[in-house]
Image: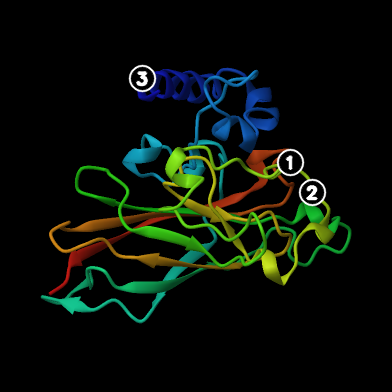
Amino acid sequence: MKTWKRISVIGLVASIPLVSAVAIAFPKAGAWHTGASATSPGGSDIFATGGVSDWGLTCANCHIKAPGLIDATVLPTPAWPVKNGLKAYTPGASYTLSVSLVGEHLKANDTTMPVPDNLNSFALTIEDQNGKPQGVFTTDGTGAGFARSSDQAPCTGGNAALPAGFWEVQPVSKYNASTGTTFLGGDCHAIVNLTIPNKVNWTFSWKAPAAGTGPLTIYYGVVDGSSRGSNSQDDDVKMGTIKLLEGP
């Protein structure tokens, strides 16, 4: 699977600058998540966080020509402890993380744009020094199919099937308070947004790994979207990392 993924990703990324239409029409988000054995094979759970588990790919590999006008915050509750003047985590502790898009400017106040088209997004993973995802992600959803933790089935089987049409156009009425704002799919190495128009804040929880895991890196990306994936060139992107020492 890993060998296939490496080859397929190189092929996808390499083709983007060769054919201008590719950046506009392909690959749609679903192509990055479809399994290698699917009828139309894809990247098998690539979420473009920039982490090793995503082969170093970032949101900027698809959302090209981003003007770089947005920012993003990743804020924990409780706050990260401090060790030797640097951010750290407490082994085994649970944190509520809030990811926010700062400075949204694409289509946010455009009344001529259909509401479903103003779709922002994010993806985040947390890895150790060997590039292995660490800790347990849990979505903020409570409804059936949306309340998921990365240490439970179906995530642990690598088959956390996404709802039909999850990455494509969906009716605004699909989501309510019980579905939350975040989702886990595929092998669940990264947590991502639900496709809810006009969202700029997303929430989930993360349980830190056990003592002895060592330093961790949070990899994340946020996209200020304007065309619901139909043209990746009109979106703005912010990628970032946060280093965490293992706390006492």
Seen from the viewer's position, the closer of residues 150 and 245 is 150
Question: Looking at the image, is mark 3 or mark 2 earlier in the sequence?
Answer: 3
Does the image show residue 159?
yes
Left-right relation of 125 to 85: right
Residue 170: image tag = 2
Residue 65, placed above or below residue 218: above
Q: CA distance from mark 1 to mark 2?
A: 7 Å
Q: Amino acid at mark 2?
A: Gln
Residue 121: name its quadrant.
bottom right
Residue wearing tag 1: 165
Q: Are marks 1 and 2 in contact (CB under 8 Å)?
A: yes
| Residue placed furthest toward the front | 153
Query: How does the figure colour the protein chain or chains?
Result: rainbow
Judged from the image, the secondary structure of the residue bearing numbered disc 3 is helix
**In the image, residue 10 lies at what x, y percent?**
43, 21
Q: CA distance from mark 3 to mark 2?
A: 33 Å
Does the image show residue 238?
no
Question: Looking at the image, is mark 1 or mark 2 earlier in the sequence?
Answer: 1
Judged from the image, the secondary structure of the residue bearing numbered disc 2 is loop
| Label 2 crowd (10 A; few <14 / some 14-19 / many >=20) | some
Residue wearing tag 3: 3
**In the image, residue 215 lies at what x, y percent?**
18, 58
| Label 3 crowd (10 A; few <14 / some 14-19 / many >=20) | few
Quadrant of the image containing the C terminus = bottom left
Q: CA distance from mark 3 to mark 1?
A: 27 Å
Left-right relation of 203 to 28: left
Q: Look at 49% across and 64% down and name the residue there.
A: 71
Residue 31: name its quadrant.
top right
Seen from the viewer's position, the closer of residues 209 and 225 is 209
Quadrant of the image containing the N terminus = top left
| Residue placed furthest toward the bottom | 78
**In the image, residue 196 lies at what x, y percent?**
71, 59
